Amino acid sequence: MEAYLSLQILQGLLAVLLLAVSAGLAWMVWHRWQASSWPQRPALDASVRVGLPTLAVLVIAAPIVAWWLLHLGEVPFGYLWVLGSACLYLLAGIAWLLLGQRLLRVYRQPALADQARFLPVTFACAVVALVVLLIILLLIALRPL
């Protein structure tokens, strides 16, 4: 039972960190979009060098811990909220991949940020990932016991 409680705490911590990193990257893109000038490399270094690897680790760790919790709690994978959360997490993962790819591209070539549609589409990827993650957390919170 201690392992189950520890995994529940870890899952909650992963969810909060995933929300914080995703919201931070979305805020960064929104702020840069509204400022109409992308910062030079030193200003962008910390958010890309720390934010994207952290996001990658969290995106990989969260479903592993969740599936381990389901296994320990003997919850069948066939429940609708489990299947719905897994499908939505796949959609959020695609949005995170697109967000990371676009941020790496603008990190390597800052002139891309001057294109009319680059930052709005990047911000849309971040918003989709955040909204889908919030829906997943809502599904988990309202699951039948």
Image: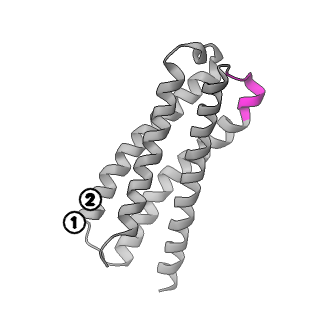
Q: Residue 87: give x, y in percent of width and height.
A: 30, 51
Residue 125 to residue 91: above or below: above
3 left or right of 76 in image = right
Q: Work out whether mark 1 precedes mark 2 in sequence or the reverse, and give the earlier one.
A: 1
77 left or right of 43 in image = left
Mark number displayed over residue 83: 2
Q: Residue 91: give x, y in percent of width and height.
A: 35, 43
Q: Residue furthest right?
A: 42
**Based on the displayed image, in which of its 4 quarters is residue 70 positioned?**
bottom left
The overriding secondary structure of the stretch rendered in magenta is helix
The answer to whether the residue labelled 1 contacts the one labelled 2, judged by CB atoms less than 8 Å apart, is: yes
Amino acid under label 1? Gly
Mark number displayed over residue 119: none
Circle 1 sits in a helix, a strand or a loop, which is it? loop
- Image quadrant containing the C terminus: bottom left
Mark number displayed over residue 78: 1
Report the coloring of the rendering. one colour
Circle 2 sits in a helix, a strand or a loop, which is it? helix
137 left or right of 102 in image = left
Q: Is residue 42 magenta?
A: yes
Tell me what residue is drawn at x 55 percent, y 68 percent: 10
Q: Residues within 10 Å of mark 2 (few under 14, many from 20)?
A: few
Q: Residue 41: give x, y in percent of width and height.
A: 74, 24
Q: Residue furthest bottom?
A: 1
Q: CA distance from mark 1 to mark 2?
A: 6 Å
* Of the pair 126 and 36, the residue shown nearer to us: 36
Tell me what residue is drawn at x 44 percent, y 54 percent: 134
Tell me what residue is drawn at x 61 percent, y 39 percent: 27
> What range is drawn magenta here?
38-45
Q: Is residue 13 magenta?
A: no
